[in-house]
Amino acid sequence: MDDLRTRFGQLVAAHRRRRSMTQDDLASAADLSIDMISKIEGGRSGARFAVVERLAVALQVDPGELFLAQGGTGSERRGPFADLATRLVQLPDEDLRWVEGILEAALRPRR
């Protein structure tokens, strides 16, 4: 259970940073206390479904993204796409735009 809480907290923090939000911003947007956000992001507290939904709305993500972006090990592992998604979600918007440009150039049909 602690591993799930830790992964959940890491993803909440990564999505928050990606949106250039402070913990205070997220707390206000999700109608939670800053202490609760800190505990969730630190893996020291879980979140009930209603809280997960409020966080997802505040972060403008599907609630599943707060659990699934991390690559696991063994049977949980979803392959290179999940590993890449985990790394990308932690990047700030400026870096994401740079990566997007590289991907567009790399995936452009060759003539």
Image (tube, rainbow, N blue to C red):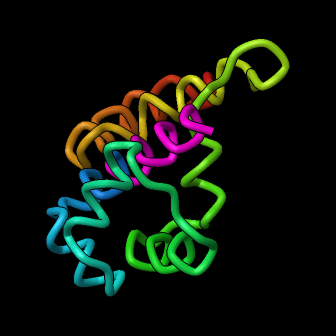
Taking the image as shown, residue 93 lies to the left or right of residue 47, namely left
**Image position, residue 111 (x, y; %):** 62, 23
The residue under the point 39% across, 69% down is: 59
Q: Is residue 68 above or below residue 51?
A: above
Magenta stretch encompasses residue 12 = yes
Looking at the rendering, the stretch of residues picked out in magenta corresponds to 1-13
- Identified at 29% across, 83% down, the residue is 29
Residue at image location 43% in from the left, 28% down from the top: 87
Does residue 45 lie above or below 80 as drawn?
below
Residue drawn at x 78%, y 25% is 76
Left or right placement of residue 38 versus residue 10 in this view: left
- In the displayed structure, 101 sits above or below 30; it is above
Task: Say which of 89 and 37 sits in front.
Answer: 37
The spot of residue 104 in percent (x, y) is: 48, 36
Q: Nearer the viewer, residue 3 or 97?
A: 3
Q: Is residue 37 left or right of residue 65?
A: left
For the image, the number of numbered tags is 0
| Location of the N terminus (image quadrant) | top right
Residue 55 % position (x, y): 44, 72
- Magenta segment main secondary structure: helix
Q: Is residue 14 magenta?
A: no
Residue found farthest to the right: 75
Q: Position of residue 18 (x, y in %)?
A: 29, 52
